[in-house]
Image (spheres, helix red, strand yellow):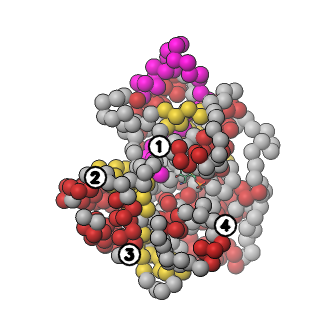
Amino acid sequence: KSRTPLTVFDQLESEVRSYCRHFPVVFTKASGHTLWDRQGKAYLDFFAGAGALNYGHNPPGIKEKLIEYLRQDGITHSLDMATDAKETLLTRFRDVILAPRGLDYKVMFPGPTGTNAVESALKLARKVTGRTSVWSFTNGFHGMTIGSLSVTGNRRKRNGAGMPLSHAVSMPYDGYMGPDTDTARYLERLLEDEGSGVSLPAAMILETVQGEGGLHAASESWLRRIEALCRTHNILLIVDDVQAGCGRTGPFFSFETAGIRPDIVCLSKSIGGYGLPLALTLFKPELDIWGPGEHNGTFRGNNLGFVAAAEALRYWEDDGLRRVVEAKAAAVRAFLEHLVGAYPFLQGEVRGKGLMQGIAVKADGLAERICSRAFARGLIMETSGPDSEVVKVMPPLTIGEKELEQGLSILEESVKDCR
Ligand code: PMP
């Protein structure tokens, strides 16, 4: 791929830092749904930090809280110590998120990022059940460390670990075998049949909408059947809400609409409120069996993350943001359906839910070409899916309606460029 040389970045950054390679500019500042490069050119953000910026860049209320906290010499790094900032976050998380939904979870800080939440969930499930294997799903993405990678469906990403990854068994996600095959029934049969040869897993781990794996969204009925299977066979259900959570699909938790109650929930990305690294692992109280030191980490006490996260939860004190997201999501859906209809060369299929929707296109490299045309026109977008076949629309949840429309019309122009 040709790209503009970025001098020091090209010389010193490893190829592993692949995200920024798609954008041949150096970014300088950002506010709300806009980023600016060194030349002062503005870009609309339809990527939102891969879901870490649900409230946009530098959201003013959170920014003020952080500045105030620093001014008062608030503690920034506290390992496992109790701090004011941690208490405020835990209290607000209980009052604003858990209690109104009738959810009873213990809250753990597993480490700074999404993969830490997943690792802690996998470890806990194995420890609680005394079983080793975990069932994951085709095209799922759960992180880049060895445990979370072992439950990630993408073979290319798994190969990055340089060896076969054990203890995870990949099962077909909802719709994987086409609309006529009931994959929940397949799982049920494997569990019931003595002859199936599969051993009982400790847990199943899934995303309700597959953020990196191509925006496949599980149906609510499938999720309920998976939950029922877990209950019947005493398997723990882990929902990885790292990307689909924090309102990305409308409600705070992506699984709320299905009415399921996972045993363990992983949160990260936008839980940090301000793009700050933070992760939470929620688990049912009876699963709290770890002794001191059985899961810890130096950056579990990121108080700037606590401050920003607590302030961000103010968005969830009523259902205003949820309604806004659902309205914008319906507008995005209608627009993407229009594109699929108006541009048959795409051979497009609209996928996803909420403000993580996109169009899967047929031709090789087409989604990437559309995204690079969009970038030239001042719109930042990324692809999703094992073959980068999906153009992903993922703006901050707080984007204005006018800017959302503006971004969508740039997308349409970019599609036309690729005809
Ligand atoms: N789970 C999901 C669903 C994700 O989308 C991601 C990140 N894209 C992760 C886990 C891993 O998070 P992190 O990159 O913060 O480790």
Q: Is residue 8 left or right of residue 382?
A: right
Q: Assign a secondary structure to mark 4.
A: helix
Q: Is residue 23 above or below residue 297?
A: below
**Rendered location of residue 121, percent (x, y):** 63, 41
Cβ atoms at labels 4 and 3 below 8 Å apart: no
Identified by mark 4, the residue type is Leu
Residue at the location (19% across, 59% down)? 342
In this rendering, position of residue 245 left or right of residue 298? left
Q: Is residue 214 something that shows in the picture?
A: yes
**For the residue marked with disc 1, what is the amino acid?**
Asn
Question: Which disc, if any, is residue 348?
Answer: 2
Out of 249 and 51, give the one closest to the viewer: 51
How crowded pointer 4 is (Cα within 10 Å; few <14, some 14-19, many 20+) is rated as many
**Residue ID for mark 4:** 304
Point out the stretch of residues depicted in magenta: 184-212
- Residue at screen point 63% across, 78% down: 8
- The answer to whether the beta carbon of the residue marked 1 is less than 8 Å from any atom of ligand 1 is no
In the image, which is nearer the foreground, mark 4 or mark 3? 3
Q: Earlier in the sequence, mark 4 or mark 3?
A: 4
SS assignment at label 1: loop
Residue position marked by numbered label 1 in the rendering: 139
